[in-house]
Image (cartoon, grey):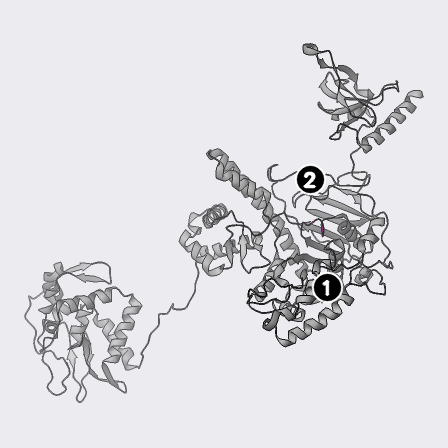
Amino acid sequence: MDSIGLDTTFFEDSGNSLQTTFFNDISNESVPLAEALNTTFFRSSTSGSCGFQVLDTEEHTPGIPIQSQNYDQNAENVQATSKRRKVWNDWSSLLDKPCCDLQCLRSLSLNEIESCWESMLDMTESEQKVFILKELSAHTQVKGSRIMETNLVICGKPVCPPAWCCVHNVSDWRYKECMKLVKSGVVNIRHGNAGRNRKMERTTVAIGWMSQLFRSVGDYMPHKSVVYLPYHWTRRSVYERMGSELNEVHQNQHMVIAYSHFTKIWKTHFPNYAMAVTSDFTTCSTCAELSANFRTARKDETKKELADLKAKHDGQVERERTAYHEARQTARKFPKKVTCAIIDGMDQSKTDLPHMLVKDKDNVHLARLPVHLTGVLIHTMVAEGKIPTVYVDHKQFPHDSNLTIHCLTDALIEAKEHLGEVFFLQADNCYRENKNRFIMSYLASLVSMDCFQQIYLHFLPVGHTHEDIDQMFSRVAKELCQSNAFTLEDLKDLVTRSYTPPVTVKDVKAVHDFKAVLEPCMAGAFRGHSKPHWFRFQKSEGIVYMHYKMWLDSPWQPVSSDSPGLVCLKSCPDSDTMPNWVEPNLEKLDWEKLCKELPWQYNSCLPQMAKTWWSTFLGEMQEEYSEVPAETQTWSVHHLGQRQPDNEPELEEVLDLVKVIQDRVNAACPTITIGKQGKTVRGVLEMDSFHTVKEGMMVAVFMEEKKGRPFIGQVTAHKSDEEVTVHWWRGTWMGEYKSWNVGSGRNNKPYQTDVPMQSLLLWDFLLTKKGHLSRETVKQLRESYEEADRKSSL
């Protein structure tokens, strides 16, 4: 479109049609329209149309092309803005250009010419072509493959084709191409790339990075379909993190998209991921503390330190989430090797019945039947990759370990055809339901009965525990926002259809007292098990051992050559045991108010069928839900069967070693003890153990004199490798100990003496808050004194 001239034959004359020819008799170059308009035209008297035929041309200087000779004199009237767009400055000069014997250009005003020219410049190339084709199709008569007549119009005024092309800045080549399309009957055209969504490599990389990050840190809400990212994040901080990570990988800053494109991708591809302004649930104390300190920090060094620490903490949480995701994928890929499950409860009042979308003032305060949902998702190789089950109770049973074991055992039995050798269980940090000695003993019993060869129990950090099971509950919540659930059957149907695959819904009408069965079999009291996030149960030489660790990248504990682990059970519960039933309690239901107000005080809010259902249900519920079954049943664990190891290679543990974050974020893992197991043995009478005595430790000293025992003091200094200085404390076996000072006034000072290392019996023990010796310390001290007396008498 560099030229705005016409140098071709527009129409071929046949019969009544007209023939118009523009040609250049000097050279093969195109004659611009400005030169073509200097040609004398006449209007055909037979057709009434603007037909064109060359009669004569003005003389020109030999050797100089017409294009240069005539067009250059108007060069100052044209301003070139690009190769295909030109802006005309002097519009009046166009009016002097002859186009035909009627001088169509002179019939147009300067405003009309400028408006047409500028409107074409405002269009894209594709839009211009569509406009030209539309105008030619509307004002051209075609018969067969021949053009009979063309009557073009500008602002309601008829003009000839050269004038129309001149005003609209259309080249001759473009005009011809569009006329060919008109001949063939084409009305609409489409750009070749229209509808093709081709992404550049950096866009694809950004989408993949965002997808991986959002899946690893997103919290699925049990009552919303929105997935929340950590509430202290911003879109700008996510973009900056993406830029830094991609630059490290690709070493090319051009692989990072612009921030505007980043926000567009977020809106298009991840519309359900949002930043939480505030958290609806318990937040991570570490995140909250770091964010609060960052907001109040003034020094750049402090802000940088806090930002680095926050990034490391987020990385720790991501790795913990990834561990569950990898276990989930492994279970779907190797179902005979691994089984992965997650269990959690939906504790939302919106499941109370009857549930109505429209609540008026008359029924908003009426009694409703409490309904609690406990969900279990088992991941394995099935069509949808998971088997969802929901258990319904009315809070007639305590929400403790018994209910958790009941739901988990029933779900495993239903999926027993898909169980593997290794079981990975993801649970919530609730100590009442999951993180307690009964659940750990139950898992140890499953390994002891050979139901699984190995079991992993994993807990996500507090404040980061929402996972795919909460997504299932969010679908239930969304369905409740769109549908009424007048009865319990309506709610079950709603839960079943709310998720893919369909959910199996079961009523919990009776629960065994598993705690009473497990407690006599435990090896001792559990302590310190509330902090670690990982537990492993496996059998070695017929004994089930438990190991634990704080984080995914922490080492398993205990590490001891004397014992391969902690023993949870001193004996395994018998599979033929008939446990008692848990007594149901209907106090939380407020039974009297429920029977009084349901369903009759709801008036017209409930349909008649729902009222009939409630009358029948309430009549049977008290008898059915308030009494335990008359017959006892054996422990159902034996229905899981036994799984022996096969010849397949051992499954690699889901573990990705990473750098350990700083001590402030990665808290030290406490020592778990079961009875005497796991306790540190202190004060052994061996010479190579005295190097552990440090300043500030409490020590017990052996003296042959028995009166005044035990002799307790605190190490204040190391005199040599064989002696320490001890500040003595006064007290009795069962009484309070206080530091022993001598002198008065300014002469008051600690009573200290030098003691040989070999006389130390016990060290590194602590007094209680009241200054007493603990029971364990007293017991160990008495045994140590007896042993030392026996050796001294020899």
Does residue 338 appear left or right of residue 135 in this picture? right
- Amino acid under disc 2: Cys
Q: Residue farthest to the top?
A: 747
Q: Amino acid at mark 1?
A: His
Q: Which residue is mark 2?
A: 669
Q: Quick check: is 379 in the magenta stretch? A: no
| Secondary structure found at label 1 | helix
Q: Position of residue 324 (x, y in %)?
A: 64, 53
* Image side of residue 129 versus residue 328, left or right: left
Residue 768 place in picture, x, y as percent: 75, 30
Q: CA distance from mark 2 to mark 1?
A: 35 Å
| Number of marks drawn | 2
Instruction: Looking at this view, name the residue that lies furthest to the bottom.
Output: 15
Q: Is residue 719 above or below residue 533?
A: above
Return the residue at label 1: 418
Q: Provide the residue span drawn in magenta.
A: 428-434
Q: Is residue 90 above or below residue 668?
A: below
Mark earlier in primary sequence (2, 1):
1
Q: Quadrant of residue 740?
A: top right
Camera-nearest residue between 48 and 320: 320
Badge 1: few (under 14), some or many (20 or more) residues near its Cα, within 10 Å? some
Residue 491 placement (x, y as % from top left): 64, 68
